[in-house]
Image (tube, grey):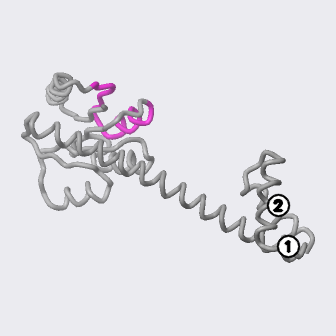
């Protein structure tokens, strides 16, 4: 974890609390800019940020950390105003904890933030995979249509040709389909 808190004493207390519970603190920052640099360099499982810090506030730092997909962020602050909570939510923070807090407050917030982040990463990977598969399917369908028109083949014959070309040339079906499409475009 990376802790970003401008007050050294609070940062030390937080670090000790985390370490007592088995968490590893890999970096400490006194301002938002430093927190971003450390997070980008160390790639922690979680970044804990205070809101009011010099140079760059914690919510703005969280927004950049989350936007760059570096790590999930937990906002830990003495301020509970609705506008700050909304800013933190909009910045992509996974949790918002108000001081004073206890370990009994902090640990569940950490676990939930990390867990939600892992779920989001898994969902993003699944969406990406599905998008790639859909794009591949579209290209293969288009290539099949071109082969059917060009050679008078049936759909299964065109599909089998793409499959065989894929295996023979050690290319993905998507790559073979793209070659077929590019070749047809050059001829027209």
Are the two marked residues, 1 and 2, in contact with CB atoms closer than 8 angstroms? yes
What residue is shown with label 2?
161
Does the magenta portion include 17? no
Q: Position of residue 106 (x, y in %)?
A: 15, 38
Total numbered labels placed on residues in the image: 2
Report crowding for label 1: few under 14, some 14 to 19, many 20 or more residues within 10 A (C-alpha): some
Look at 31% across and 32% down and name the residue there. Answer: 2
Q: Position of residue 80 (x, y in %)?
A: 12, 53
Instruction: Using the image, determine if residue 18 lies above or below residue 36.
Output: above
Q: In front: 132, or 58? A: 132
- State the mark number for residue 114: none
Q: In front: 64, or 159? A: 159
Among the 4 quarters of the image, the one containing residue 13: top left
Look at 90% across and 68% down and name the residue there. Answer: 186
Q: CA distance from mark 1 to mark 2?
A: 10 Å
Query: Which range of residues does the magenta coloring cover?
Result: 24-41
Among the 4 quarters of the image, the one containing residue 32: top left
Q: Quadrant of the C terminus?
A: bottom right
Q: Is residue 31 left or right of residue 183?
A: left
Look at 20% across and 23% down and name the residue there. Answer: 19
Q: Is residue 24 left or right of residue 71?
A: left
Q: Quadrant of the N terminus?
A: top left
Q: Position of residue 82 (x, y in %)?
A: 15, 61
What residue is shown with label 1?
153
User: Is any atom of residue 143 visible in this view?
Assistant: no
Q: In front: 164, or 30? A: 164
Report crowding for label 2: few under 14, some 14 to 19, many 20 or more residues within 10 A (C-alpha): some
Q: Earlier in the sequence, mark 1 or mark 2?
A: 1
User: Is any atom of residue 138 visible in this view?
Assistant: yes
Q: Position of residue 157 (x, y in %)?
A: 81, 67
| SS for dot 1 | loop
């Amino acid at each position: 974890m990376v802790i970003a808190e401008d007050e050294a004493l609070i940062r030390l207390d937080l670090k000790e609390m985390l370490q007592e519970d088995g968490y590893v603190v890999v970096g400490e920052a006194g301002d938002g800019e430093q927190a971003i640099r450390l997070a980008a360099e160390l790639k922690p499982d979680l970044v804990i940020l205070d809101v009011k810090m010099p140079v760059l506030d914690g919510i703005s730092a969280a927004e950049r950390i989350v936007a760059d997909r570096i790590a999930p962020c937990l906002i830990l602050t003495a301020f509970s105003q609705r506008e700050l909570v909304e800013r933190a939510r909009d910045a992509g923070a996974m949790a918002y904890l108000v001081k004073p807090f206890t370990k009994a407050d902090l640990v569940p917030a950490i676990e939930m933030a990390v867990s939600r982040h892992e779920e989001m990463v898994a969902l993003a990977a699944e969406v990406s995979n599905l998008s790639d598969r859909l794009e591949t399917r579209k290209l293969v369908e288009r290539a099949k249509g071109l082969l059917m028109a060009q050679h008078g083949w049936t759909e299964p014959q065109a599909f089998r040709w793409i499959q065989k070309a894929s295996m023979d040339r050690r290319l993905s079906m998507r790559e073979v389909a793209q070659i077929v499409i590019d070749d047809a475009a050059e001829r027209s």
